[in-house]
Amino acid sequence: MLAKAHQEKFAICQFNINNLEWTRYILEECQKNNAPVILGVSSGAAKYMGGFLTVVSLVKGLLHDLKISIPVILHLDHGGSFEECQKAIDAGFTSVMIDASQYDIAKNIAITKSVVDYAYPKVTVEAEVGHIGGEEDSVISDIYYATVDDAKRIVEDTKIDMLAPALGSVHGLYQGEPNLNFERMKEINDLLNMPLVLHGGSGIYDEQIKKAISLGICKINVNTDLQIAWSTAVRDFLNNNDDVYDPRKIIKAGERSMKKVIHEKLLLTGSINKA
Ligand code: 13P
């Protein structure tokens, strides 16, 4: 899936899932648009849903019952340790991210390599170099940005399938303007010529997303934009419908807004009809 995206210069969306309804809305909208998709599951979301096995069963059930035929990858987002990645793989995840970016590059490489050795050849592995900030980071300082040297080392030493180099994007809402280092992105892409991942895909301008895709980004992670679309619609629905108490009606109030954002992201990343 990623090799095709890399070759044809489009990006596959990773949409993070939080519950059954989110998973369903994402799968339905991607199926409707004939777009391949990556379902991202953070460890927090996996715990929230009951555990890795529950998530795998939930996704498998929906793929079957909704007759989903597009390619779907179930991916652990920001796996915090070898053990966590191992548990996700054993439960049936088809892809994992090991995020050991808080350690020095040697330790990051060692941990990442242990995950690749366990995952290969059935499960794909993503790793991070540099440090992707959060919305608490008002200033993304230079030390957050991945270096070309670290990117080269981790890829050569571990043979990961995808690399997430931190280049100025943040998870959650931006405080101020997104400041992506496209020059560094180009250098890394020219040198490594492999699938690169852009985290923090919410709140980045469309033109920046397009430029990133032209520079080798072929997986874009989106979570916050869906959360905002869903919660805004549900809040509005509750404010206007005092008498409704059926949870199905309340949760479903966010469906249309979420699917609209999903469609916009698929359009922007060029993944429509790429299944
Ligand atoms: P956003 O929440 O900013 O869209 O980031 C999602 C992400 O990168 C998940 O890994």
Image: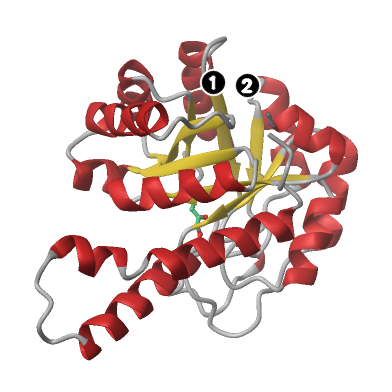
Q: Which residue is mark 1?
A: 113
Percent from the top left, x then y, of residue 264? 64, 64
Q: Which residue is mark 2?
A: 158
Q: Quadrant of the N terminus?
A: top right
- Give the image quarter of residue 46: top left
> Cβ–Cβ below 8 Å for labels 1 and 2?
yes
Q: Is residue 40 left or right of residue 153?
A: left
Look at the picture and state if 28 lies above or below 246.
above
Instruction: Identify the residue shown where x is 44% and y is 72%.
Output: 229
Instruction: Report crowding for label 2: few under 14, some 14 to 19, many 20 or more residues within 10 A (C-alpha).
Output: some
| Element at label 2 | helix
Instruction: Identify the residue shown where x is 30% and y is 23%.
Output: 87
The answer to whether residue 139 of the structure is visible from this angle is yes
Colour style of the rendered protein structure = secondary structure
Percent from the top left, x then y, of residue 124? 56, 23
Identify the amino acid type marked 2: Thr
Look at the picture and state if 233 lies above or below 68.
below
Percent from the top left, x then y, of residue 241? 19, 85
Could you tell me how far apart the alpha carbons at marks 1 and 2 are, in whole angstroms?
5 Å
Furthest-right residue in this view: 190
Instruction: Identify the residue shown where x is 55% and y is 27%.
Output: 125
